[in-house]
Image (tube, rainbow, N blue to C red):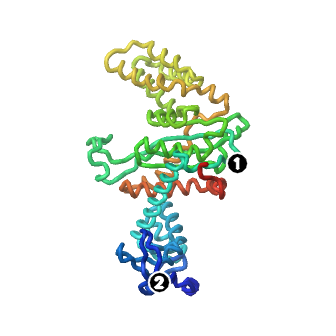
Amino acid sequence: MLEQLLAADPGYRGPRVPCGQGHEAEFVSYRDKVTDTVLGPVTLTRAWYHCEQCRHGLAPRDAELGVAGASMSPGLAAMNDRAAAAGPFARAAGLLADLAGVQLTVKRVERSAEASGAARAAADRDRAAAITARKLVPLPPSPLPDKLYAAIDGTGVPVTSKETAGRAGKGEDGRARTREVKLAVFFTQDKLDKNGYPVRDRDSSSYLATFEPAHVFADLVEAEGIRRGAGHVRQLTILGDGAAWIWNIATTKFPEATQIVDLYHAREHLHDLARTLEFMLGDHKQDWLAARLDDLDYGDIDGICAAARAYPLVGVKKTELDTALGYFENNAPRMRYKWFRSRGLFVGSGAVEAGCKAVIGQRLKMSGMRWTIAGADAITALRCREASSQWEAACGAPHNQTGAA
């Protein structure tokens, strides 16, 4: 029935049609093309044109149906993308066969999903460039949230040896085995719970990720911030683990934002500091650590540093202490936790930590996986789209952006 429906228009558009390169292509004949659809393979007979100057052919009907240069229908390609983003390619092929009765090879599932993901990533970069250049102006969300957060982090993805050639790593042999993907999660908050703790708005999270350098990622983050209404909300907050590249992005792209170091990372550093001093603290280590954790909760970084420097250290130990305290001293304005909490703000970056595990780790860091950067970037783009789908469904209504005046 689908074949008969599609055959009602054989795609003849006259003796000549534009070839897309400024020339005209001439009608040659009618040719068959087999396309896999959600209902199975369909054979379509359509008009075929050839451009003498470009020396290539085209079928206008293919472009109209969304199958130009492709062997899957748009519907099947979308199903394939979701299955491949959810799990390994072999499992995705099995799901399509079991649930839809569509038989695809594992390699075909992989190639189609990676092509879709690459197209998605390229479209996101193009849109980001248009937004930051003010060629595309997204309208602010409606209703406008009170607080908008951007939580930023990075995580390693196992890649092939070719992708890490010449890179230093943390392994015993000094070789790198992973490449970092940078991830950002934007979400909103309007309410506090009965205990006064902030509550993330349901279905408000949107995700973006890339293996590109930090300066490229910064442009993507800026564009997403603009799209999410960063310039209109009352309170914009950037959450991170203390890495310098995160705060460079925050300061450069969102100078008006409040910057907060994740409290739980800060506590980990405080535990490390206590281990550095434990040979001096002796049996009082736990009491000293408990007091310093209280200092941290109050944002008293001067108190932490004074308590640590009360012990005279020299040589390597003094260098270790200075390095450990440098983390707190450099981030002191971002560690005013008592004040942040009094304003009803999140002080933990759990949203992006969970994103690193759920969006990235559960698909790209499974046992035995080794990715190319191109393949991992493509699947990451599909995963981010899926993770952002609830917010997109709620807020991605038509006419929510306009060309610049």
Which disc is residue 197 wearing? none
Q: Residue furthest right?
A: 194
Q: Is residue 43 visible?
A: no
Q: Circle 2 sits on which residue?
A: 15
Q: CA distance from mark 1 to mark 2?
A: 50 Å
Q: Which mark is residue 142?
A: 1
Q: Residue at x 64, y 43 (%)?
A: 188
Residues packed near mark 2 inside 10 Å, few (<14), some (14 to 19) or many (20 plus): few
Sequence-wise first label, 1 or 2: 2
Label 1 Cα neighbours within 10 Å, binned few <14 / some 14-19 / many ≥20? few
Q: How many marks?
A: 2
Number of the front mark, 1 or 2: 2
> Label 2 is placed on what type of residue?
Pro
Q: Residue at x 39, y 76 (%)?
A: 51
Q: Is residue 145 visible?
A: yes
Task: Judge from the rendering whether residue 80 lies leftward or rightward of residue 173; answer left or right.
Answer: right
Q: Nearer the viewer, residue 105 or 137?
A: 137
Q: Amino acid under label 1?
A: Ser
Q: Position of residue 239 (x, y in %)?
A: 54, 36
Name the residue nearer the viewer: 356 or 268. 356
